Amino acid sequence: MLDINQLRNDLDGVAARLKTRKFDLDTAAFAALEAERKTLQTATQELQAKRNSVSKQIGQAKARGEDVAPILAEVENLKGELAAKEAALTELQDKLDALLAGIPNVPHESVPVGRDETENQEILRWGTPRQFGFEIKDHVDLGAPLGLDFETGAKLSGARFTVLRGGVARLHRALAQFMLNTHTTEHGYEEIYTPYIVNDTALFGTGQLPKFAADMFKVTRGGEESAVDQYLISTSEITLTNTVAGDILKAEQLPIKLTAHSPCFRSEAGSYGRDVRGMIRQHQFDKVEMVQIVHPDASFDALEQLTGHAERILQLLELPYRKVLLCTGDMGFGSTKTYDLEVWLPAQNTYREISSCSNMGAFQARRMQARFKNENGKNELVHTLNGSGLAVGRTLVAVLENYQNADGSITVPAALRPYLGGLATLQA
RNA sequence: GGAGAGGUGGCAGAGUGGUUGAAUGUACCUGACUCGAAAUCAGGCGUAGGUGCAAGCCUACCGAGGGUUCGAAUCCCUCCCUCUCCGCCA
């Protein structure tokens, strides 16, 4: 959520920057609502002040044993007028809040302006795609004999659910363990185990709600609607970031660095038809997530570090990747700046997203009311960052495809062998 | 799932309709005393918003949301959460 004062002070400037990310801010509508709010709020508060002082007089008069009937008559008509004003003001505030909650974050000045993913800026390529001396297979064909079982997944749960068996299941688990261990022991993150079901307030805090409800899985208790809506998490960014919701932190607690391995559930309503083959796009996938809660002055440095932590995983696994700075038109809703990491997938002969690392600035902190006491003793919003480190399912795909051998076996990356009892080759 | 108790400022804890945004203690900040510290004394010390050049003035907030009333932390309703006991369960 943006700072409403920023909109009041620089409406056209903000609108111009939002336009670069394809968001049309209705400045006339906002200005009109704001003007109306201002007069209505002033009028309401004047009436409230009057009511308060008269009510106080009644109390004093009663204490002196005087007749209060004349004063009561005086407030009589005040009541209806005030109630109407208060109701109108609440309605107006709700409108403004809803408008504000639907506005995406303003891109940082270092972000290239562009329409879509074709205008993203490649920062670097790491590693060299391997030359295969044989006909390569994609992860679906490679995985089938090793335990990648789409049919059973579909039988149990429908399309875009996958069962992993035997060696592939173990490899998948090893990847998650390896990532988690690396972030906790080398990168200074605290390991967190989080709930997978969250309240709607948490989703509002990180920005999934109200706009992106269609991407979520909603759950019920005993099949009944409850007063509080609950959803399966689409990423543990939600739970990790919301750990500080409503808090006023001490400056010396920052930065807070958290990591978790969790399943992620996405209904991806708009993506049918894309990546239908294989386990690139699933309704359920595992991810190791990194979140940082930082001092506002430190957030862009922290973004570089956090992205580096995700890159480190790819490097240790010796998977070729490229690092891309997303342009304004391709960034997520709450982000000020985002790097995507794309891993080389030989069967697709292209780089595919495996991590997305974003600095959300104060956007989520404002929604969550997550603050810290700054140097002047004032409460100030923190900045939040998050990044995948990495998407486990897609990493599994990348390992299968990049480490395949002519006989269909998979060489286990050296970094993973300790997690597989020293196993060097995965075969059927 | 059943029965009960409770949610008030950083913390503890008063307050059951009227100058209560909230006693008191504690923590914290400033000043006095001191060579310095402790102790003591005095003062300050919530959040959000409106308005104003500013000092200030005003409004809202006692888990959340509604209601009753001229007036609600206090009365009523709904929800959320915490604790205790029982049941069930991993």
Image (cartoon, rainbow, N blue to C red):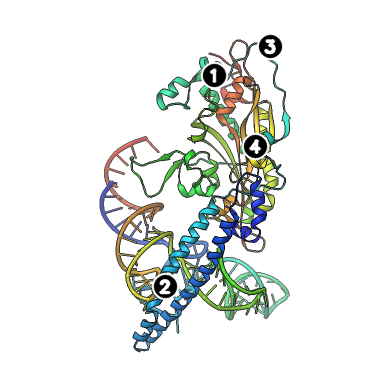
How far apart are the alpha carbons under marks 2 and 4? 52 Å
Instruction: Locate residue A392, reporting x and y percent.
Output: 56, 30
How far apart are the alpha carbons under marks 1 and 3? 20 Å
How far apart are the alpha carbons under marks 1 and 2? 69 Å
Which amino acid, mark 2? Glu
Graded by Cα atoms within 10 Å as few (under 14), some (14 to 19) or many (20 or more), the crowding at tag 1 reads some
Q: Furthest residue to the front? A: A28
- Which tag, 1 or 4, sits closer to the chain's start? 4
How far apart are the alpha carbons under marks 3 and 2? 84 Å
For residue A185, side relative to residue A146 (left or right): right
- Which tag, 3 or 4, sits closer to the chain's start? 4
- Residue bearing mark 4: A116
Q: Are marks 2 and 4 in contact (CB under 8 Å)?
A: no
Instruction: Locate residue A314, reporting x and y percent.
Output: 66, 29
Residue under the point 66% across and 47% down: A107
Q: Are marks 1 and 4 on the same chain?
A: yes
How far apart are the alpha carbons under marks 3 and 4? 36 Å
Instruction: Locate residue A168, reporting x and y percent.
Output: 53, 21
Instruction: Kindly report which numbered mark, 1 or 4, lies closer to the viewer in this rendering.
Output: 4
Q: Which mark is residue A133?
A: 3
- Residue bearing mark 1: A140
- Residue bearing mark 2: A81
